[in-house]
Amino acid sequence: MKALCLKEPYQMSIEEVNKPVLTEDNAIVKMEMCGICGSDITAYKGVNPTVKYPVIGAGHEGIGVITEIGQNEKGLKVGDRVALEPYIPCRKCHSCKEERFNNCVNIQVAGVHTGGMMTEYFSHPVSLLYKVPEELSLEKATLVEPLTIALHGVTRAQVKPGEFCIVTGAGPIGLLAALVVRAYGATPILVDILEDRLKFANSIGIEFTYNSNNNDGLVEYLKKVTNGKLPEALVDCTGSSFIISKMHDYVCHGGRIAIVGWPKSEVMVNIVRCIQKELAIFPSRNSNKKFPEAIDLINSGKIDVEKLITKIINIDATEDTIKDIIENPNNYMKVLVRI
């Protein structure tokens, strides 16, 4: 079978590899579609410290159809369309025993630590397969995994109905996080430095946006929107050292902060202000038990992901597309690869 392989940075090619054999507790899935994630871009560039080369089959945002499966408690069968959760826990460490599987000490992420999903057939644990309703298109279903990341971040920030939540970063995860905040009955305030992305956010129903090129006015804008209180929660989807160093300014006393974005450098945090405001700060890693909720939110139409899809490409165009994303990142939201 064919697989899109990343042998080392900047060396991507379609290779012939052995088709996986059915094993106990796993299923064989014929892959149909897979999204390109920011981590795939950093893996291609060689700046993702978690990637283990060679990657046999890039990607981890996959949708496919089961072709082989044994008896299982989930009732899945051959022919079922499934979303694949890429975070494979050991189920033995202390985090797994607490059912924080996303935070497993020995976690293996498909397409990062082990083989990925841009391959004709893929072997994956049955426990990490989730049936996709027949009425849900493959294209929309491919956004399930990115939505789980946003869901986990918003959950970590404990966003409640009636609250305000500032979301920093209007990339795919930030936009999804803002939509989750709205779906949870709270009001998102989306912040970015790119006006086109903020206009796009307005077009998909995010009312309050702010261009943080004028960072000096951000706190006043937040106070204006929240009638002087400041938001109760913040979800950072940038990893910006500047944003994180100022995060205490953007939430009210007793506020809650989830950090989803990965900083690329050391961050100075004003601990004194965090103490004075008694802030709760929650790093957010991967997602945990969010796939069923994400599938339901997309299938029910409560979160419309279709407009986030920039283009759909064939697998042989993946490397050229990644190169263009690197050169022109602002032209893209989500790219889906047809396997």
Image (cartoon, rainbow, N blue to C red):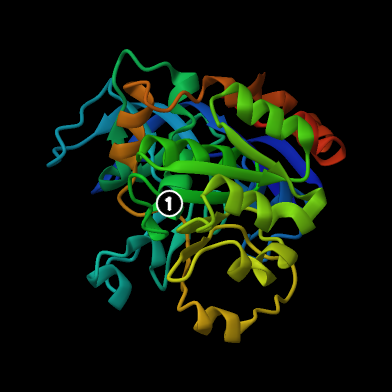
Quadrant into which the N terminus falls: top right
Camera-nearest residue between 297 and 3: 297
Q: Is residue 227 visible?
A: yes
Residue at the (82%, 41%) spot, across then down: 326
Residue type at numbered disc 1: Val
Residue at the (75%, 60%) spot, across then down: 47
* Rendered position, 320 above or below 240: above
Residue 159 % position (x, y) = 38, 52
Quadrant into which the C terminus falls: top right
Q: Is residue 60 visible?
A: no
| Residue marked by disc 1 | 154
Residue at the (50%, 25%) spot, across then down: 305
Q: Residue furthest top?
A: 135
Q: Residue furthest front?
A: 227
Residue 17 % position (x, y) = 57, 39
* Rendered position, 57 above or below 257: above
Number of numbered labels in the structure image: 1
Q: Is residue 329 left or right of residue 109?
A: right
SS label for mark 1: helix
Residue 85 % position (x, y) = 39, 44
Q: Quadrant of residue 263?
A: bottom right
Camera-nearest residue between 217 and 263: 217
Q: Residue furthest bottom?
A: 272
